[in-house]
Structures are given as structure tokens and as C-alpha cells.
Amino acid sequence: MALGEIKESRVLRELGRSQNPQNAHALLLNLGHWTNSFNPYPKRFGVRLSAPVINLPELPEEERVDLTHLQAFAIDNAWTKDPDDALSWEEPNRLWVHVADIAALVVPDSPADLEARNRATSLYLPEMTVPMLPPEASERLGLGIQDISPALSFGLNLDSEGGIIEMEIVPSWVRVSRLSYEQAEGMLHDLPFEELLRLAQNNEARRKRNGAVSIELPEVDIHVEGGKVVFHPAPFLRSQMIVREAMLMAGEAVAGYALREGIPFVFSTQEATEIPMLPDGLAGMYALRRFMKRGQLKSLPARHAGIGLNIYTQVTSPLRRYQDLIVHQQLRAHIRGHDLLSHQEILQRLGAAEAVMSNMRQVERLSNQHWTMVYLSETPQWQGEGVIVETDGARSTALIPNLGLETHLHCQSSMPLNTLVPIVLRASNIPDLTALFTVATRIGS
């Protein structure tokens, strides 16, 4: 029952306990059959924790453009093991976005493609990463893993405001250096990072003029390192903005290219919504998130209101997302003059992947909560700070930035929004994924 495999438990019934996975989990902990660290959510949702075991073919012999003369940088979190995009700058206003050429080896309906469709995405848990594709794919095609990597490269000529004038798509050879966001942040006054930052700032300003909505809430990466739960608050770095804007520019350019060329494609869309006047600070960001509509994948282009683009597709993560892999398969087939998937075939593939994707995202979310509760159970004297983001009389909602957690607080009186309050942990419950915090008069009380 704790793993979601059955709906009735004679043991729980005889003990007079409600028959649900949470009570089964609690009993297994009380009996010592499970430890606190056992994460039941992948099995509860039927998610596989083993990597795909499929042999990939050799890279086909084909003409590739040699771009190894360009400085190319794959910028990501320090712990990333599947670098699938990199950036180059070329005078005067040309941005190159290089993406791991996964579709060169993973063609439609091949064993690796079917496996990726069944997984939909790589699974990122605090305790482990389960790749969508065989590990061999990252080892052979991940950018910067080998001295020279095969890529599908997008060359974008930009105007002074970040608009895309023209684009070319070429299979290429690239020489990539890997950097963490923190390393890149320290190089922003050097070329090519100074120019990459300028291009990114231009594009961000252009999107904002076109109605882009920016939601900046605290983000925390949770990892299990040496058996300990470690929280890595994600800072707001300009190097992250460079990568984000470059990925958006590539997605916009590729979507426009597909539309002009009549390629059956996957477009990312989001309907606009009317947003009322909101408070400032984190409270405003917290409220804004509720007004945003869910994004949708469609076979016909439509505006993506949240990012302020009239046409867009995701194209830079074919190692990690099946949606991006479909896009790469279509682009490669078009460039090489091969048969394209039809709109109907694309929708069928997306439908199968999206059903799995929902489960995967739920497992990631619940697993993060699980490990947060494990940490709190092992740190019963935890003290910290929360930010009031919503109030209802004496009842307030607070965000705990250092934990990436949302909690409800009972206060003696209503507190102003965005108030920073000292809080202490009173209780935590791993099976129920709940923690109780109270407001302290001061840290240490």
C-alpha cells in the first residue's frame, strides 16, 4: 500500500488505521522496516529508476560545418551531467546556439526513440538523476564531454534590439568549454561574455515591451550528498539570464523557420490573462503566479504570452526532453531532404509523452518535499526566516527562501505583506509531507 500497488491493507484495518499510503508509510517507519531516507514516490507513480540500456548506432558520415574556430561555452549548474547546449558570439551581432545533435543517432521509431517517448523527460531527484536516453548519448554527444562534439548549430543574425533578422541551421563540429554559472558570472567583463550579455539584455527588453511576464520567486536545488540533504539556493545571476535569453532566441528563430518552411512542428503556447494590480515584492510574485495560465503544446503556432513571443518552440534540450527531440528530428529530416513526421504523428507522440511527463513532474515535486521533510526531521531545532506573501486575518502564508518551502503561520495579528519574520520548526511528518512552523519573537527563542 505504501508503494501504491494495492488499495486495501488487512494489517492497517486490523490496527484500526485508515488504509492509505501515508499511514502505511508511517507504520513501516515505526517498525524500522523503512528508514526516513527511503523515497517511495517513484515506485508509487510507477516511474523507473534505471537508465535505458540501448545501443546507439554510429554517427552517420555526413557533411558538417567546422565551427571549432569559435569559442563555445556550455554554461549550466556545476552538477549538470548532460550538457546539451552551448553559446558562441561572432562579430558584429551574430549569436550561435549549439545543441547536442541527438537526432543524428535517435531517429523516429528507433528503439532509443521509443524508450525516450515512454520516459518523456529525464528525471531529476535529489538522490539521483535518471536519464531519458542511454548514458552513452551524453558521453558521446554531450557538449564539452569530448574535445570536439557534433552539434546542430543555429546561427542568428540580430538587430540592435535583439530581433532576429535571419537564421541558418547547420550540422556542425564544435569545440566547447564547460562553465558553471558562477564561473561565467566572473567573466562578464571579458569577451565574448560582455557581448553575450549585451545581446541577452536587448532580447529581454524586447520581450518585456511585448508583454513578457517575469516571476522571480526563490528557487532551491535539493541534493543528497554523502547521505546528507543539502539545499543550494539559486541566486539570480546575469550568466543565467544570458543562457535563458539565448535559448528563447533560438526557440523563436526555429519556430519561425518551421512556419516559413511548412514543417509539421511542435509549438509552445500560452494564453494571455488579465492581471490586476498586485503588491510589490515576493508577495506580488506569489500572487502573479496564480494568474498565469498553463502552457500548451500545439501543432499550430500561437502566442506565448508569458515569455512575450508571438511564436516559440523548445529546441535546446533534446537530451532531456522528448518534445525537443521531436523538434530536432523534424529539423534534421528537413535539412537532409528525408520524410517528415505528419502533424498527426507528432500529436500522437506528444500525447503519449505528456501523459508520462505529468507523472514525472509530480514525482520530482513530491521527492523534493520528501527530502525536505527528512532534513527537518534530522534538524528538529531548525530556525530561520520566512517572508509573508499572503494574509487572511491572523493566518498568513510565508515562503521560506532557504528551503524553497511554503508554509502557513498563525500570527497574533495580521502582518504586512513582505514582512521578514523569524520562524522555528515545531514538528515535521515525513509520510504526510507536512511541517509546522511558528513565529518566534526572535531567532533563538
Image (cartoon, rainbow, N blue to C red):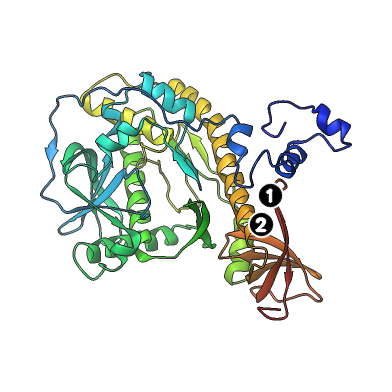
Residue that badge 1 annotates:
430
Left/right placement of residue 32 relative to residue 299 reads: right
Above/below status of 386 relative to 310: below
Callout 2 crowding tier (Cα within 10 Å): few <14, some 14–19, many ≥20: some
Is 308 above or below relative to 412?
above
In the drawing, does residue 83 fall left or right of residue 445?
A: left
Q: Is residue 155 left or right of residue 307?
A: left
The residue under label 2 is which amino acid type? Ser
Q: Position of residue 126 (x, y in %)?
A: 51, 48
The secondary element bearing badge 1 is classed as: loop
Residue nearest the viewer, comparing 332 with 394: 394
Task: Using the rendered view, name the quadrant where residue 436 is placed.
Answer: bottom right
Q: Position of residue 165 (x, y in %)?
A: 25, 50
Query: Image point 73% across, 36% down: which residue?
Result: 21
Instruction: State yes or no: discs 1 and 2 in contact (Cβ < 8 Å).
Output: yes
On residue 377, which mark appears?
Answer: 2
**N-terminal-most mark, 1 or 2:** 2
Location of the C terminus (image quadrant): bottom right
Quadrant into which the N terminus falls: top right
Query: At x 45% / y 53%, what residue is drawn?
Result: 308
How many neighbours does mark 1 have within 10 angstroms: few (below 14), some (14-19), or many (20 or more)?
A: many
Nearer to the camera, 374 or 170: 374
Furthest-front residue in this view: 32
Res 123 label: none
Residue sitting at 64 percent across and 47 percent down? 36
Residue 301 visible from this viewpoint: no
Residue 6 position, x and y percent, is: 73, 25
Residue at (73, 73) in percent of width and height: 439
Q: Amino acid at mark 1?
A: Ile
Which is more toward the observer, 83 or 169? Answer: 83
Report the number of numbered marks. Answer: 2
